[in-house]
Image: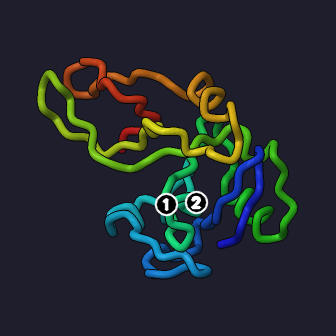
Amino acid sequence: MKWVEAEGTHYLYFTRADGVSVPTVLGLNIALAPPSVETLLAASADFRLVLVRNVLEPEEGLVYYLHWDNGQDLDELDRKVERDTYTDGDLAHAAKTEYGPTTCQKCGQVWRTLVLPLGDPYIDAPGLYERKIREHAIIRTCPNCGEPLRQLVVKIF
């Protein structure tokens, strides 16, 4: 894991090889996602865990998942982050997302998803959230019944 600065924002980037079950990382107290997410991260080809320092509680870290929708080689990006050779362009196609359940209002099926947050996760980069919404926001439909999911879902597991 390493602090990354890209697109005017800062976060602690976890490579695929980094564990996510530690209670404190570089002085940040964190409440990480359920263990099932760690299994998903180990096999992930399109998202990585990141922590953002909480503006209101600077000793706390907020958990997000950077999601890429362009097929980018994230193992190569992991190596670039480890070597400090990444650029803004390596992270330009990623959006901060949150992991959680999304329930279809029609059939009631619950899906594990990554969604764009309701609030701006790019506090230190004005305008970036709106750009990410324009580039990544798709109202996906329920794989079970086809009803729109009513959230900005970027990935259904």
Residue 126 x/y as whole percent: 69, 36
Q: Quadrant of residue 130?
A: top right
In the picture provided, is 157 more to the left or to the right than 103?
right
Image check: 97 left or right of 18?
left
The residue positioned 56% from the left and 68% from the top of the image is 58
Q: Nearer the viewer, residue 43 or 38?
A: 38
Q: Secondary structure at mark 2?
A: strand
Judge from the rendering whether residue 33 lies leftward or rightward of residue 78; answer left or right. Answer: left
Q: Of label 2 and label 1, which has the lower sequence position?
A: 2
Frontmost residue, 44 versus 124: 124
> What amino acid is found at the position of numbered circle 1 in the picture?
Leu
- Taking the spot 59% from the left edge, 41% from the top edge, the residue there is 95
Residue drawn at the location 41% of the way across and 68% of the way down = 32
Evaluate if marks 2 and 1 touch, with contact meaning CB atoms under 8 Å apart: yes
The residue positioned 12% from the left and 26% from the top of the image is 107
Instruction: List the residue tagged with mark 2.
Output: 52
* Residue 100 appears left or right of 154: left
Q: Is residue 76 visible?
A: no
Identify the disc placed on residue 62. 1
Q: Foreground: 144 or 130? A: 130
- Say which quadrant the N terminus sits in: bottom right
Residue 81: x %, y % from top left: 76, 64
Q: Is residue 138 visible?
A: yes
